[in-house]
Image (cartoon, rainbow, N blue to C red):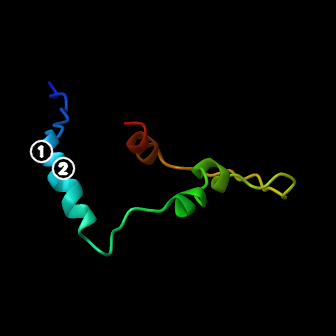
Amino acid sequence: MYRRKREIVWPTDEEDAAIVAAALSDPDAQPLTEDELAQFRPWRARLLAPPGAPTVTLTMEFDAATIAAFQR
């Protein structure tokens, strides 16, 4: 079965300007300030246990259909 390759359609400069203007006009969705951006941390840093923290080894079993669904 032939699958069509997905194609990303990028907005033109005019469309992009209209999108940005509409987003900036929303008082509930203002851009983050530099101070707010500085508070962000990488996802990986949040997912790992801090150095020296106790860890637990865990083994889980899944049926083949579950594993196949995530391998696509």
Quadrant where the image shows the C terminus: top left
Residue 50 is marked as: none
Question: Image point 70% across, 52% down: which residue?
Answer: 48
Q: Which mark is residue 14?
A: 1
Q: Which residue is mark 2?
A: 17
Pointer 2: residues within 10 angstroms few (<14), some, or many (20+)?
Answer: few
**Closer to us: 67 or 34:** 34
Q: Amino acid at mark 1?
A: Glu
Residue drawn at x 66%, y 51% as measured from the top left:
45
**Residue 58, position as x, y percentages in the image:** 71, 53
Q: In the image, is 54 to the left or to the right of 1?
A: right
Location of residue 8 by image quarter = top left
In the picture as drawn, the residue positioned furthest to the top comes out as: 2
The Cα–Cα distance between marks 2 and 1, rounded to whole angstroms, is: 5 Å
Q: Secondary structure at mark 1?
A: helix
Disc 2 on helix, strand or loop?
A: helix
Outermost residue, right side: 52
Q: Residue 26: where, in percent of width, then height?
A: 25, 71
Mark 1 nearby-residue class (10 Å; few <14, some 14–19, many ≥20): few
Q: Position of residue 31 (x, y in %)?
A: 39, 62
Would you place residue 64 above or below residue 48 in this image? above
The front one of 15 and 7 is: 15
Q: Looking at the picture, which amino acid does disc 2 mark?
A: Ala
Nearer to me, 13 or 8: 13
Using residue 17 as the reference point, say whether residue 36 is left or right of it. Answer: right
**Residue beneath the point at 62% across and 52% down:** 60
Task: Give the percent coordinates (x, y) of residue 10.
Answer: 18, 38
Vertically, is 27 above or below 16?
below
**Left or right, 52 with reference to 3:** right
- What residue appears at the point 23 percent right and 68 percent down from the top-left corner? 25
